[in-house]
Amino acid sequence: MTQARKRLVSYSDTVYYHCVSRCVRRAFLCGKDSVTGFDFEHRRGWIVERMTELAGIFAIDLCAYAVMSNHYHVVFRIDTDQGSQWSDRQVAERWLQLFSGPPLVQHWMAGNRLDAAELARVSIYIELWRGRLLSLSWFMRCLNEHIARMANREDSCTGRFWEGRFKSQALLDEKALLTCMAYVDLNPIRAAMARTPEQSDFTSVQQRIRHPDNQQLRPFSGNSDEASGIPYTLKDYLELVDWAGRAIRSDKRGFIPAQTPPILNRLGMAPDELADFLNNKQDFPRAIGPVDQIRELALKLGGAFLKGTAISQRLYAKPA
């Protein structure tokens, strides 16, 4: 049964989330449709461009993404510290890049004199917008609605472009984060759209390989300071993706290289279980992480159970 987003998201437990959105009826509205012959590959570029634009406005960082022919994946980090430190003017400037805003705020931004009641109303708007600039739901709304309008305009039609709500998945620790990032970046290889990560168009891993200093993606910090970036090195991550990519290639199904990347040993993850997770289409668990953290999150969100316990038990099994 569909649940309210507030019962699926808890920033006090984790700031990392994996989101997925699919085209209506899973039609190929963002790629090449073999039935109709239409080619909408350029729309995949629209999605990447809009995502990076929004990441520069919201207090939300992009960790990984993959735009496929009929859906896309994205891994976010919510930067609650940054959002709380913005001044009122910075919040308004960011929000007004997306929406026109009420005339009262426009007068305030222009430096016009306002009375106490008007200033109080401006403060209410600012705090509302601050919360929205930290919201997964508003980020996805600004992304999906924008793409739907562009696609409908191009097709000279109206109606739904996306299949209902986006799905979200909480990533409760760094193991879950790196596992999910690799899962996202390997989507084109798993779908036989590319043979290697560097050939995987419209993915974050391709951007990291081509532009290691890419400012549009959350960087790898190479240390344990999570505030400065993802607490591993880019080299570690690329080794992990390369290892997993070799394991799931269609011409080498079931092949696990004898030499696994050192990062797996540091993460304490079982190579066979990780390869199996990355090689198979997942039934979208609501959370991935240590089982005790999943149970704790479920209680905080008002439930007794969150889908993802069984998968996490396998992923977090101690390597043999």
Image: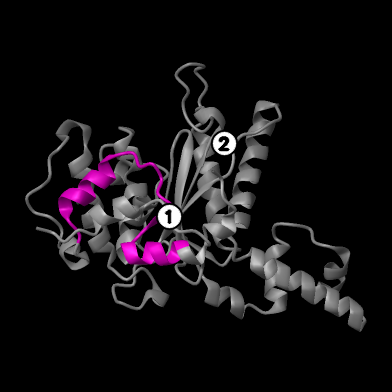
Counting from the top left corner in percent of width and height, residue 263 is at: 19, 63
Label 2: which secondary element = loop
Task: Specify the amino acid type for callout 2.
Answer: Glu
**Residue 229 versus residue 303 in the image, above or below:** below
Label 1 sits on residue = 306
Disc 2 residue crowd, few under 14, some 14–19, many 20+, Cα 10 Å:
some
Give the amino acid at mark 1: Leu
Q: How is the image coloured?
A: one colour
Q: Nearer the viewer, mark 2 or mark 1?
A: 1
Identify the residue at image location x=52%, y=16%. Answer: 36
Does residue 271 show up magenta in the picture?
yes
Magenta segment:
269-298
Quadrant placement of the C terminus = bottom left
- Check the image and report above or below for 287 versus 68: below
Please indicate, yes or no, whether residue 202 appears anywhere in the rendered image: yes
Q: Looking at the rendering, which quadrant does residue 270 occupy?
A: bottom left
What residue is drawn where x is 78% and y is 76%? 123
216 within the magenta span:
no
Residue drawn at x 42%, y 44% is: 202
Give the number of marks. Answer: 2
Q: Are marks 2 and 1 in contact (CB under 8 Å)?
A: no
Q: Quadrant of the N terminus?
A: top right
Residue at the limit of the structure toward the front, as seen here: 304
Residue 189 in the image: x percent, y percent?
A: 30, 38
Residue 163 numbered tag: 2
Horizontally, is 197 left or right of 91 in the view?
A: left
Q: Nearer the viewer, residue 291 or 60?
A: 291
CA neighbours of label 1 inside 10 A, class few (<14), some (14 to 19), many (20+)? some
* Relative depth, front residue between 303 and 128: 303
